[in-house]
Image (cartoon, coloured by chain):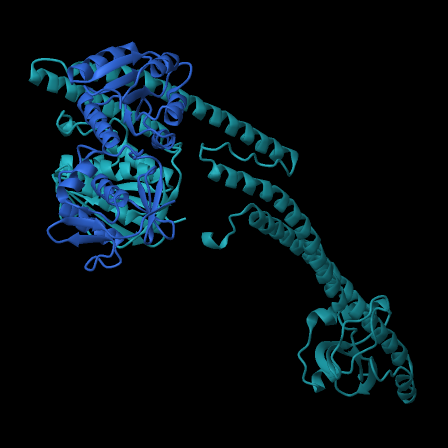
Chain colours: A blue, B cyan
Amino acid sequence: MASAGEPHILLVDDEQSIRDPLAQYLVRSGLRVSKAKDSAEARRLLSAYAFDLILLDVMMPGEDGLSLCAHVRESVGVPVILVTARAEETDRIVGLEIGADDYVTKPFSPRELLARIKAVLRRAGDRPSRHRGPTADSYGFGEWVLNTGERELVDRSGVAVPLSTGEYNLLLALVLHPRRVLSRDQLLDLAQGRELAAFERSVDNQVSRLRRKIEADAKQPALIKTVWGGGYMFAAEVTKL
Amino acid sequence: MRRLLPNSLLGQMLLLTGFALLVAQLVNLAFILSEQQKLSLAQSEGPALGRFAQAAGVVSHLPAEQRPALIALHRDPMRVRFTMSAASLVASRGLSRNPALENRLAGALKEAGVAVTGLEAASAGERLLPPPPPSPLFPPPPRRLGPVEHKVLILSARLPDGRWFNGRIVAPRLDHWLLHQILVATALLFLIVFGAVFWTARRLARPLQDLTHAAERFEGRAPPEPVEPRGPADIRAAIEAFNAMNRRTLALLDEKDRMLGAIGHDLRTPLASMRIRAESLEPEEERERLVATLEEMAGTLEDILVLARTGRARETVRPVDLAALADAVVEEQREMGRPAEFRPSPRAVLPVQPNLLRRAVRNLVDNAVAYGGRAWVAVAEEGRAVRIDVEDEGPGIAEEKLGEVLEPFRRLEESRSRQSGGAGLGLAIAEAVARAHGGRLTLDNRAEGGLRASLILPKP
């Protein structure tokens, strides 16, 4: 962690028309921001200063954002949010596989970006032991596999069972914290950190929907247990595949 | 009748050749048979009549007491028997006279210089033991044992002394053997010609089938497997032209993708810049209006890019439970507080591109909510297909405009307001996604009111 004061962000984007106003906005929002116009400049700054987070454009002349992201993950270990002007699902997965902590598509709402920056910073501060966000991993539990790259739940026969954004976020929160009692507030917080906008329905409602999808018998849940007075607990053994 | 006719190249060539051959053979056979008939008439009746006339000439000049000896001399138990009698044999046998035969008999008698005062002739069928084989060149066809129906000529001539000289002569049997030969030859001809036609048609049809399969498989994604040029030169040329066309098409599609990528990037960047700047705009109403406009622009750009790329999307095809997919899309709409409901539907698994399909269902639900107030979504298996129905309770669409709304950028006049939003690409995208999955999008007005949009996706 860099400084005790406001978090220090490195903003890397070859487009001045984005770099400058975005830096202004982030500074106004209480962050310290350094700007770099390409990967070379970013590397120089990275070797000179400590940063809390890197906001990285994917498509840049010279070394592109993906390559720089891989370098950062290996050597510096600073969380990265990728920003891209391409919106295809495969691009997002590639970005997450390379180790980015989150992924934002242009044009984005600056407020949403700020919320994501804060969520990533909080996660990084939460658990220094390299707990990463939505990387492209697979988690196995019971009859199911949850792929965080495709954001997809797959059953034993290989059939994908699509989940809504809210259901997915909730399930991911549960899967990442197995055998721990999580209160409704904690769950809401964990799930909301990833995806804003879409989590207004109550946790109980989402849990009962999830149970109908993944439990053999939704009336006698074996995976998502209700803890009286406490909240919920993911009871299954989760293996990272 | 139409259904009985073959549609394939092979079938039609065989049918046509067979028909032409049959007509030709029938004409041929008719000629042969008429010649054969004349020949057999001459063969069978001519000698019998001549023989009778000659015998009658001899008998008429002999005194009555010598006649039996001569008659006995001419007797041939198998084929010929002459008699003398007071009444004609034709009459005493009660046979009906045959005028044509009588004419020919008169001619034969005249030729032999025999004067008679009357004549009668008839032919009759008699069952006799078979004669020896007529043609030594070909082995005779297997024949039945025992008596065989033969044609027998009964001839009577009244001699100048008033007595009747009768002859009973077995005519040689018609030569059926020739008919057999013709039939065998015809069958052989059919076999040879059909073989040749079959071979040729297969040689033509195989590469054409390859071509058809290749055209069906062409999706514009991976480089297409070139069709192996084979068959006759013209077909080879067609295949090579097809392969070249595929390469050109793919190059065009790649270029389109590159262009769209560039456009997407070049428009998204300034949009992103404007979106960030808009955030510090005052007063707040002004900011909100600008943000809404920018978001609409971004949405339209996104839609155009998706529509232009559908069918070339890089998303992998994988088995997905479509009921869960539709349920998830509805749930997301509900998470945003929109009036959408999912009717519990049984699991229906199909290999699809789930993100594209989610977008298609989402567009239909958006549409239903925007124009019909509320969306009901249900999934059902129907024969060899899975259908995803999205129903609303709006006014529906006039029947004659149902087709129009699927066209890109088309919105019905009455709905051309900012509130119902969008560039009119939602349904076009849904339809393009359905097509990319080999299916279709149908729209119809429900009997209970409201519109039903159905994505119908075939099982593989």
Q: Position of residue B422 (x, y in %)?
A: 20, 27
Query: In percent of the image, x 15 and y 22: which residue is there?
Result: B292
Left or right: residue B83 compared with residue A159? right
Q: Looking at the image, which residue sits at the far bottom? A: B65
User: Where, by quadrant of the figure, is residue B355 drawn?
Assistant: top left
Query: In percent of the image, x 55 and y 31: which residue is there?
Result: B243
Using the image as rendered, state which of residue A85 and residue A114 is in the foreground.
Answer: A114
Left or right: residue B45 compared with residue A82? right
Number of disc labels:
0
Position of residue B138 relative to residue B373, above or below, is: below
Query: In percent of the image, x 73 and y 71: which residue is there?
Result: B101
Left or right: residue A125 compared with residue B190? left
Position of residue B280 relative to residue B71, above or below, is: above
Query: In percent of the image, x 44 and y 24: which residue is there?
Result: B254
User: Where, by quadrant of the figure, is residue B419 drawn?
Assistant: top left
User: Would residue B34 be visible to someone looking at this image?
Assistant: no
Position of residue A64 relative to residue B385, above or below, is: above
Using the image as rendered, state which of residue A50 and residue B113 is in the foreground.
Answer: A50
Position of residue B354 relative to residue A157, above or below, is: above
Q: Position of residue B147 (x, y in %)?
A: 74, 83
Q: Position of residue B202 (x, y in %)?
A: 62, 46
Using the image as rendered, state which of residue B163 and residue B102 is in the foreground.
Answer: B102
Q: Position of residue A47 (x, y in %)?
A: 36, 15
Using the image as rendered, state which of residue B200 and residue B41 is in the foreground.
Answer: B200
User: Would residue B371 be visible to someone looking at this image?
Assistant: yes
